[in-house]
Amino acid sequence: MKTTKNEETVAAHYGRLLGIGAPWKVVSAELDLLRGQVVIEVGWDESGPVSCPECGQACARHDHAPEREWRHLNVMQFLTIIRARVPRCACPAHGVKTVRTPWAEPGSHFTLHFEAFAVQVIAACRSLTQATELLELGWDGVQRVVDRAVERGLARRSTEGILYLGLDEKSFGRGQRYVSLATDIKGARVLEVVPGNDQAAGEALWQALPAGQRARVEAAAMDMSAGFVAATRAQAPQAAIVHDKFHVAKLLNDAVDQTRRAEHQQLQAEGDDTLKHTRYLWLQGQLPAARQAGFAELLEINLKTARAWAYKEQFTEFWGQPDAAQGAAFFAHWQRSVMRSRLSKVKAVAKTLHRHLTNLLTYFMHPITNAISEGFNSRIQALKADARGFRSFTNYRTRILFHCGKLKMLPHLQPSSTH
Ligand SMILES: [Zn+2]
């Protein structure tokens, strides 16, 4: 091939853009205006040394791998492709291996610069749909970037020093399907996602920590389901179990709501609409100003719902007790009072709480909750709503870890490659 002086300059220019140097060199750069593409062909100086990608040994060049392509950062508005036949070496110890290229990680269809850029774009996007559009990359391509980024991040991640673990379930897909999450409570990050919400799921979550670190966890926050408790007993018997106060609040809210529904039905049968449209007044912590006067009037009426609500509100003081002894005293007082009432739904919750009291009182030693996991809900809901290309649990897991794992996911851009 005859090259003019001008073409040489263009090739050298692209070489600098790519950050590659000897023994690699840009052979040609073709601009395809019709397809809006630049194809950069990279060659190998035949006299240059080859080294085994496994052991680094300099060895004999065997042949060239078939031609292949890598997606690179766009040059101006042009989608940019690198094309090369990479030499293969014959290592006495490892056999015939394709040598490493300075512009991509082994097995990737993207250059390091493109992957680093794509990871940042995906992280900043509200949805994967948006990421596919901005990157001009298909769903599978985006998922591959996500998979590789998470793999890199998990390999670099440290779980040292984790003292508090959160175990929590989230609904997944249609029907009664669940996934479970382990969170690092202080670090505010998701550590692992597994299918199901039973004991096996709980044990799998614990195994996200290496055995040494697992044995150093002081406490774990979780709901009152038997599975997570048994899993913790099996995998980290030293860890205190702290039942999450948001789950307790939910039980009490549900009891108030069930009481209201039954009472509303009864009143309506007598033509009384007192409880109509009041559902959210009983559940909310802070009422909108416009509803406050009306709600105060409701409380004046002798309603079962109002009494159930009062027990729920009273219970929040439990968490503010100064220590476990006073927490236990408060609980005994509250429970006695509930058991004297005729509020069957609230009584049922009081009995449940009494059964789990030991693991409610641990809160005074380790005041932890699953608030971190609750905080990830909106992000996780958005990932779930992004239904395209989201066929399997595996994709769901990697996307949660990508967005909520606080992982270091960028590939190392090799500074040596710019020489
Ligand atoms: Zn070797």
Image: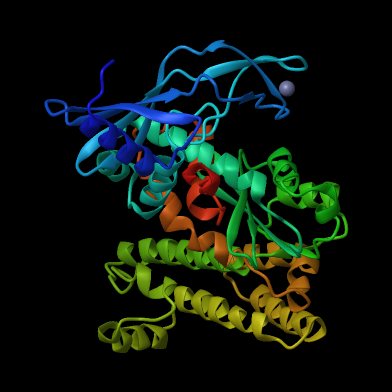
Q: Is residue 299 left or right of residue 317?
A: left
Q: Is residue 298 left or right of residue 369?
A: left
The extreme front residue here reads 5
Residue 81 or residue 159, whichever sits in front: 81
Picture layout, residue 137 above or below residue 193: above
Q: Quadrant of residue 222?
A: bottom right
Asked whether 178 or 19 is in front, the reply is: 19
User: Front-most of 334 and 304?
Assistant: 334
Identify the image's colour scheme: rainbow, by chain, secondary structure or one colour: rainbow
Q: Position of residue 133 (x, y in %)?
A: 25, 40
Residue drawn at x 62%, y 69% as measured from the top left: 245
Q: Position of residue 402 (x, y in %)?
A: 50, 47
Q: Residue furthest left?
A: 34
Q: Quadrant of ligand 1?
A: top right
User: Does residue 73 appear anywhere in the picture?
Assistant: no
The structure residue drawn at horizontal position 73% and vertical position 42%, both measured from the top left corner, is 199
Residue at (25% x, 23% y) in the render: 3
The reply to whether residue 37 is in sight is yes
Residue 219 place in picture, x, y as percent: 77, 64
Q: Is residue 247 above or below residue 145?
A: below
Residue 373: where, in percent of width, then height? 55, 59
Give the quadrant of the N terminus.
top left
Instruction: Quadrant for residue 20, please give it.
Output: top left
Q: Is residue 173 above or below residue 322?
A: above
Disc tally is 0
Closer to the camera, 147 or 115? 115
